[in-house]
Image (cartoon, rainbow, N blue to C red):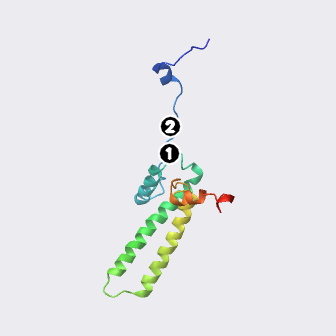
Amino acid sequence: MKQRGRKSAGELAVASPVLVQPRPDAPVELTPEQADVWNEVVDALPADWFPAETHPLLIQYCRHTIEARRIAQLIDQECAREELDVATYAALLRMQARETTALKSMASSMRLSQQSSRRDDNSATAKKNRTVTRPWEG
């Protein structure tokens, strides 16, 4: 027979077990610097955001992030020289553009970027897109 009324604190505490989703650890094939990027990304999102099938893409994202940083350092070094080698500088900028494109594509497909699904629904753009013009308004 079912008990009537409110459940006691003890009954509520035992009611249902909570399953904890562990966050994925950085793969051993990543360098320590790349593993830091992995942990930053994984820790910034819910634990279940990265199922196993997304790990290869996240690995590449971490690698491209570090490469982009290295290219930025090379660009800074080139700009700090007394005489700028325009050909080297242009090549570095092309490399940086390729890394940016790769990162943007991966971030979008893993829904990491602001433009993807994590935008606030109260933003001006979202409100503008929700506005419906009624026939009698014009």
Q: Are marks 1 and 2 in contact (CB under 8 Å)?
A: yes
Dot 1 alpha-carbon crowd within 10 angstroms: few under 14, some 14 to 19, many 20 or more: some
- Name which of mark 1 and mark 2 comes first in the sequence: 2
The residue furthest left is 82
Closer to us: 22 or 7: 7
Task: Return the x and y of residue 138 as percentages of the image width and height.
Answer: 65, 63
Task: Return the x and y of residue 22 as percentages of the image width and height.
Answer: 49, 42
Closer to us: 81 or 10: 10
- Residue indicated by mark 2: 20
Q: Is residue 89 left or right of residue 17?
A: left
Disc on res. 14 = none
Task: Return the x and y of residue 130 as percentages of the image width and height.
Answer: 60, 56
Q: Amino acid at mark 2?
A: Val
**In this rendering, is residue 8 above or below 121?**
above
Q: Amino acid at mark 1?
A: Ala
Dot 2 alpha-carbon crowd within 10 angstroms: few under 14, some 14 to 19, many 20 or more: few
**In this rendering, is residue 74 above or below 117?**
below
Could you tell me how far apart the alpha carbons at marks 1 and 2 are, in whole angstroms? 9 Å
Disc on res. 47 = 1
**In this rendering, is residue 81 above or below 26?**
below
Q: Secondary structure at mark 1?
A: loop
Name the residue located 45 percent from the left edge and 68 percent from the top edge.
Answer: 67
Name the residue located 51 percent from the left edge and 32 percent from the top edge.
Answer: 18
